Each structure stands twice: as C-alpha cells, then as structure tokens.
Amino acid sequence: MIEVTDFARFLSRWKKYISFFRLRFSMGLQYRTAALAGIATQFVWGFMEINVFYAFNQSDPAAFPMGFEQLASYIWMQQAFLALFMTWFMETEIFDSIMDGNICYELCRPIDIYDMWFARSVANRTSRALLRCVPILIVAFFLPAPYALTLPPDALTFLRFIAAMVLGMTVTVAMCMLVYMLSFFTVSPQGLRIIFAMTAELFQGIVIPIPFFPPRVQKILELLPFASMENVPLRIYSGHISGGEAVRAMLLQVFWIVALVAIGKLICGSAMKKVTLQGG
Amino acid sequence: MIEMKNIRKTYRVARRNAGFGEVLKSFFHRDYETVTALDDVSFSIRDGETVGYIGPNGAGKSTTIKILSGILTPDSGECLVDGRVPWKNRIDHVAKIGVVFGQRSQLWWDVPVVDSFELLKDIYSIPPDIYSRNKDELTELLDLGEIIRTPARQLSLGQRMRCEIAASLLHSPSILFLDEPTIGLDAVSKIAVREFIVRLNRERKTTIILTTHDMQDIEAITKRIILIGKGKILLDGDISDISGSGDIDHTVAELYRTYEI
C-alpha cells in the first residue's frame, strides 16, 4: 500500500513540473515574429561565419583542424539549435522577479524554486529551438557542396548526437541556474550575467570551435563545463569526435550536470534562507 | 489557529550621504544600519476569524504577512499556523494557505487567465472534481465568465484583481492572506471584492487576514482590528470599541496621532 501512495506522490510531483513546462512551452510557441527575426539572423550569421572559415581554409588548408564539410555542418547545426545552448538566452522574467520581489508569489507555491525554474528554462529553450530549427535545417541541407549541412555518417552517430544534445542543453540550463541563484546575492544581476555570457561564448566554442584553439588550451577547455554544452553534440554530429572519445565526452557531460545541479541547489538553499523581500 | 509570539525581524540597509565622494567611499566600505521591521509582535487568531491588519506605510504589515506565509524567516520568536512553523516546512505550509499580494501579479501575462488556473491545479495537485467545482463557483461569484479566457495583460486592474483572488482560492485553503487587495480599484470592483470576501468567510469559514489602507474595507469585512506601528502591535480589539461615533477614517487618523506613528 505504501508503495502505491509513494508512486502516486512521485507522479503528482512530476506532474507539477511537466505542467509548468507545458505552459512555458506553449507560450514560447506564440512568439512568431521573434522566431522569424531569429531565423533571418541565424542565416546571415551562419553564412558569414562559413565564409570567414572558407577564406582561412583557402589560405592554408594544412592548418585547418577540421574537414571543411565538418565545419559547415558544425556551424549550421549550431545556428539551427542556437536557442538550446546560448548562455545569453536567460529569462529576464526570472531576474525581474528576483529584483522586484515578484518572487514572493513563487515562494507561496508548494514547489521547489530550483526545479520550477529548471523546468521553465528547458521549456523556453526547446520551444524556441523547435520554432527556428526546421527552416534553417532544410535550407542548409540544400546548399551547394562544401557549404551544405551533411547527414551524419551513420545512425549510431545520429543517436549519440541526440543524446549529447539533450545532455548539452541540460548542462547549459544548469549553468544558467547558477547565475539566477547568485543574483539573489547581488543588487543587480547585469554584471554577473555579462561576465558569464562572454566567458561561456568563448569557452563554449561559439566564437570559434574548440578544435581551432591551440592544442594545450584545447585540452584544458575540453574539461571545463562550457565544452560540455554545444561542443560535444556538434562535433559528434559532424563526425569530428566518435567512438570511445564521444562516449567519454558524454560521460563528462553527465558529470557536469550532476555537479552543477548540486552546486545550484546548494546556493538555492542558502538564498532561500537569507532572501529578503522588500516593499509592497 | 494562528499564533505569533515575540516575533522579531530586522533588515540591513546600506545608507550613505549624497555626493560623489560618498559614492566612492561606499564602493570600498558600506555602513549598514539595522532597521527593525517587527519588534516583539504577538497575537493569535482563531479559525474562521476575519482580522484587519492596519498601520501606516512601513509599519511592518507586509513583513508579518510574509512571515506567516513562510517566505521570510524571522530573527527570533515563535509562530505556529495550524500547528506548522511556516518557514521550517515552506512547501507543506503553503499548500494549505492562499495569499494575494495586491501590488503584484501571479497570473501569467501572455496567456489566458484560465491557463494560469490550470497550472495552479497541477502545482497544488488539486483533484479534478474539486478544481472544477471551485473554478465554477469562483467564476460565478466573482463574475469572471469571459474574463478568464482573456490574456492577463489585457484585463483592467479590477478584472485582474478578481482573477488573482480566484487564483488564490482554487485549492480551497483554510487561511487566506490578503495584502492590500483593493489597492487602486474603482468603487464597483472594491464592493465586489469586499462582498466576496465576506461571503467566503461566512460560507467556507475561511480565516481571513487582511491588510489595507482603505478603512471602508475594514468596516465592511472585519470586526477585529490589529494596529501596528513602527514594528510594534499598538492595539488589538473590536472595531466598534474604537470607532465611537465619528467616521472611521478620522478615528484611525486619530489613533495614528495618539500613538505617534
């Protein structure tokens, strides 16, 4: 009997977060103009980046650390799934609720703040990515040869890519959660947010893919949580890392998820103890 | 049953004088001052009672509500709400109370109000039959009909406040905290809200604690008032004993003068 009620409680516990996810997700889907603007930006950006790397490749192909097709796939997949991994895609509403005290309503709910915001961020990112990825993927797929998005070498690679993408997004969200939690302790979260986003953008492999860094720097970067975001799935997709290397990279992703969530929950706990809500 | 005993709560405030020199100085060293929001506050409220909690701005009304609803932890003192310490087990506690903050919104801005209601249904794990019964009843009593199918951002303040109150009652809480629920409302909405609160207390026996600056709210809703000023409880008693003959606004202004708050 105990097991049955425990199971029911477990289900109803999850239902809260799923329902939260659903609302945020359907809300994300209604911002159509933002999605169109995003798609246009990502196209232009993708073309620009590929052209820069094309020039680089022309001048010295021997110094190019990836195959050019691999790089093109890397960039198109990056642009298509931008919303999953961009660290500056943080929710202003969450920062606002911390700043202006609206969070008091969220604290009045029988729900864990960390888990709720986690579900919310995942929903926000997946709904945005879903709206934007399809047109980019289709067009990039039909581009002429070296610029085009190519299919992964085999089905196993594709499955690994999907798994690594889910893990990578989870790392990204867990990382952003740290920024949300730390902003309980600052007057304005702006500084924190900018430093974090800039660091992440470079170390994550957004500005240039990690293989383009000097080998020694690369070794260090690959161990950092930033590399566990988009670097792993994009390089698995393009076939730049495979086999045991891919599995090891995914295990590192799992490690970072566990570590970042644990740290996030710890900060959340102490934030809840010291939180002061002002005014009104 | 709500019991507060010797509750104290202080905040730290960084203060400095005007001037660029002062700004630079505060960059390296900040002088914090302790502001006492609640100073030895004690009272108890029986089940099914309605209490008006009044006092000037900054007296500590909202702080009290936040402590009672488990959001804030007091520095010292004891507090029991139906046998629970609010801040010790926040999640268990908040499942059984309802809170309305008149100056804030709990509705999701860009989606119809009913979507927010559905979300609350899952957050509070409200059984489907109880949810639909409560929703229908609240829709009727607060005259929400078409309103709940409208996105929250397109509602007038009065319509929104009625939705906020409904949202706080979907899970049938036994205690309802209302922090300035009539602030900024027009006469019609105010009366609707007041009548609803009175009816809620009478029919469901919900314990109601109401803070407000509108003395007509107090007159219409409660018998008992608790007056707080500068973090101290100054008066706790029946409204008819204090109001005497004159109009209530003057009586309260007189009280504020007497206690120098």
Image (cartoon, coloured by chain):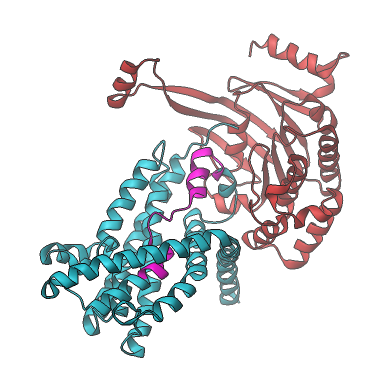
In magenta stretch: residue A26? no
* Residue A192 vertical position relative to residue B40 in the rendered view, above or below: below
Residue A198 appears left or right of B42: left
From this view, report whether residue B212 is shown above or below residue A118: above
Q: Residue at x 65, y 60 (%)?
A: B119
Which quadrant: the N terminus of chain B?
Answer: top right
Find out whether residue A96 is within the magenta segment.
yes
- Quarter of the image containing the C terminus of chain B? top right
Region of the chain picked out in magenta, as a range? A78-103
Chain B: colour as depicted: red
Residue at image location 49% in from the left, 32% down from the top = B76
* Residue B196 percent location from the top left of the image: 84, 43
Q: Is residue A177 visible?
A: yes
In the picture as drawn, the residue positioned furthest to the right comes out as B245
Chain letter matching colour cyan: A
Q: Quadrant of residue B27?
A: top left
Residue placed at 20% from the left, 62% from the top? A221
In the rendered view, would you say B203 is above or below A80? above
What percent of the width, then of the height, locates residue A32? 57, 62
What's the residue at 25%, 59% (across, down)? A203
Observer-nearest residue: B256 or B145? B145
Quadrant housing residue A208? bottom left
At which x and y percent is residue B222?
A: 81, 32
Q: Is residue B41 left or right of residue A95?
A: right
